[in-house]
Image (cartoon, rainbow, N blue to C red):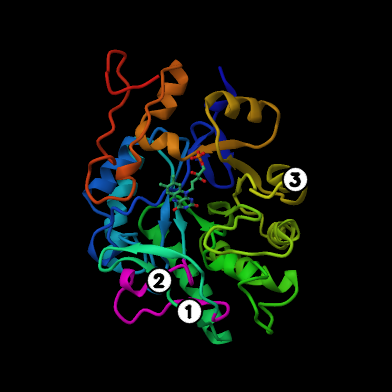
């Protein structure tokens, strides 16, 4: 049997296999950032993954910024997420919630009225994003967080981790890449603070360390993971030394003994993110980016990590685990429906049937 199908323990999380569904924003949340029935069905269909990392979800109103993304700060949102976690658990699955505060990568059109766009420094991300209200727009110019604000945001993450547990999630994953708030603190280009959260690399990783620490104290370190992609330039991120930043983060959080590090390949030439993580992190590694069944098996057999996550293959293959087990062909997805509302191109991809015409080799 392939190593992919062997069970695995990550901290307090028990995985039935080493195939992880990577987090994917799919813009299907309803009004008030609520997960709806289609999201329940979508995650239910994918419950045979050893672990589902549910899509980036805002810990606060200010943490929202993209179109139709979910949140977990209100009682209503907790109750709505409970339906998702119940559906996954009924099928024997394990599911954590990715906490994503977008910081300056936001438009006020995608936030509840009055919720501010915030960042470590008042520097606008030079990108545009989609809004239902006004189409493509520039990102907002953020307000720089005061020291009190920084402590409040850390507390919002802590509360969001507790809310996630109340909603039935087995744990949480902190989104520390793709140019969102944690990465805005860590990267030298977006952080011009002169207090304890800016300047030296140790200071720039402090915010992320304190968020992880607060969440670990609240729900247990064995239920907290974090995601990194050293040098990811997405959302206008510039960092003078991405490898040093990644090492500093791994080193700062090592004493916390977190459940896992979800590590993506780095786009920086010569920077081997998996090797860096093996050398500097004491957490179990979930490897990501560009894997298929064969390359995932080879990586795990070589001891590169404990598990492998798949994002795009999970879009059109709800039964990815069973397909890999049977050596069945993988279906390809329609990119036009990645972020459109409704079930189409979301929860209507069928499980594999040998005679299905929907499946492309
Ligand atoms: C539609 C889509 C949405 C994504 N949303 C998120 C997200 O919310 N959080 C995150 O950390 N990564 C997100 N990603 C990145 C994926 O988790 C993953 O890192 C990337 O697709 C590479 O893995 P793959 O080669 O298996 O697709 C997204 C990717 C796609 C295709």
Q: Position of residue 319 (x, y in %)?
A: 37, 29
Residue 141, above or below 336: below
Asked if the beta carbon under badge 2 is closer than 8 A to the nearest atom of ligand 1, the reply is no
- The residue beneath circle 1 is 142
Residue 108 belongs to magenta span: yes
Residue 39 belongs to magenta span: no
Instruction: Indicate the quadrant containing the C terminus: top left, top right, bottom left or bottom right.
Output: top left
- The residue beneath circle 3 is 270
- Residues under numbered marks 3 and 1 in contact, where contact means CB atoms less than 8 Å apart: no
Residue at coordinates 46% horizontally, 60% vertically from top-left? 99
Region rendered in magenta: 102-122
Q: Position of residue 16 (x, y in %)?
A: 48, 32
Task: Please identify the dominant SS of the magenta region.
Answer: loop
Q: Position of residue 129 (x, y in %)?
A: 39, 63
Report the front residue among 134 and 341. 134
Quadrant for residue 346, please give it: top left
The CA distance from mark 3 to mark 1 is 33 Å
The CA distance from mark 1 to mark 2 is 16 Å
Instruction: Indicate the quadrant containing the N terminus: top left, top right, bottom left or bottom right.
Output: top right
Residue 81, above or below 60: above
The CA distance from mark 2 to mark 3 is 37 Å
Q: In the shown orientation, is residue 24 left or right of residue 219?
A: left
Q: Residues within 10 Å of mark 1 (few under 14, many from 20)?
A: many
Q: Quick one: which residue is furthest to the top in this view?
A: 355
- The residue beneath circle 2 is 60
Circle nearer the N terminus (1, 2) = 2
């Amino acid at each position: 049997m392939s190593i992919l199908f062997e069970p695995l323990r990550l901290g307090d999380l028990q995985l039935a296999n080493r195939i992880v569904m990577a987090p994917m924003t799919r813009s299907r949340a309803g009004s008030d950032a609520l997960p709806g029935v289609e999201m329940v069905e979508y995650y239910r269909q994918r419950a045979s993954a050893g672990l589902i990392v549910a899509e980036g979800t805002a810990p606060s109103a200010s943490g929202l910024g993209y179109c139709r993304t979910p949140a977990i700060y209100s009682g209503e949102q907790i109750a709505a997420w409970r339906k998702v976690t119940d559906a996954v658990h009924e099928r024997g699955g394990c599911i954590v919630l990715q906490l994503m505060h977008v910081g300056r990568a936001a438009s006020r059109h995608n936030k509840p009225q009055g919720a501010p766009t915030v960042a470590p420094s008042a520097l606008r991300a030079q990108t545009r994003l989609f809004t239902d209200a006004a189409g493509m727009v520039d990102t907002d110019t953020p307000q720089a967080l005061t020291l009190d604000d920084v402590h409040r945001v850390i507390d919002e993450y802590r509360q969001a981790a507790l809310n996630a547990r109340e909603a039935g999630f087995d744990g949480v994953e902190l989104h520390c890449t793709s140019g969102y708030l944690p990465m805005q603190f860590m990267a030298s280009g977006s952080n011009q603070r002169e207090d304890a959260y800016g300047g030296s690399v140790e200071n720039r990783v402090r915010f992320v360390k304190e968020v992880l620490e607060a969440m670990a104290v609240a729900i247990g370190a064995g239920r907290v993971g974090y995601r990194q992609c050293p040098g990811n330039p997405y959302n206008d991120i510039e960092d003078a030394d991405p490898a040093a930043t990644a090492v500093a983060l791994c080193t700062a959080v090592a004493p916390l003994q977190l459940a896992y590090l979800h590590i993506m390949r780095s786009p920086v030439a010569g920077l081997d993110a998996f090797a860096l993580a093996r050398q500097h992190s004491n957490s179990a590694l979930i490897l990501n980016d560009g894997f298929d069944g064969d390359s995932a098996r080879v990586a795990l057999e070589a001891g590169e990590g404990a598990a492998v996550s798949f994002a795009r293959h999970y879009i059109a293959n709800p039964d990815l685990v069973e397909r890999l087990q049977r050596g069945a062909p993988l279906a390809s997805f329609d990119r036009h429906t990645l972020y459109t509302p409704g079930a189409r191109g979301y929860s209507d991809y069928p499980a594999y049937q040998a005679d299905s015409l929907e499946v492309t080799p």
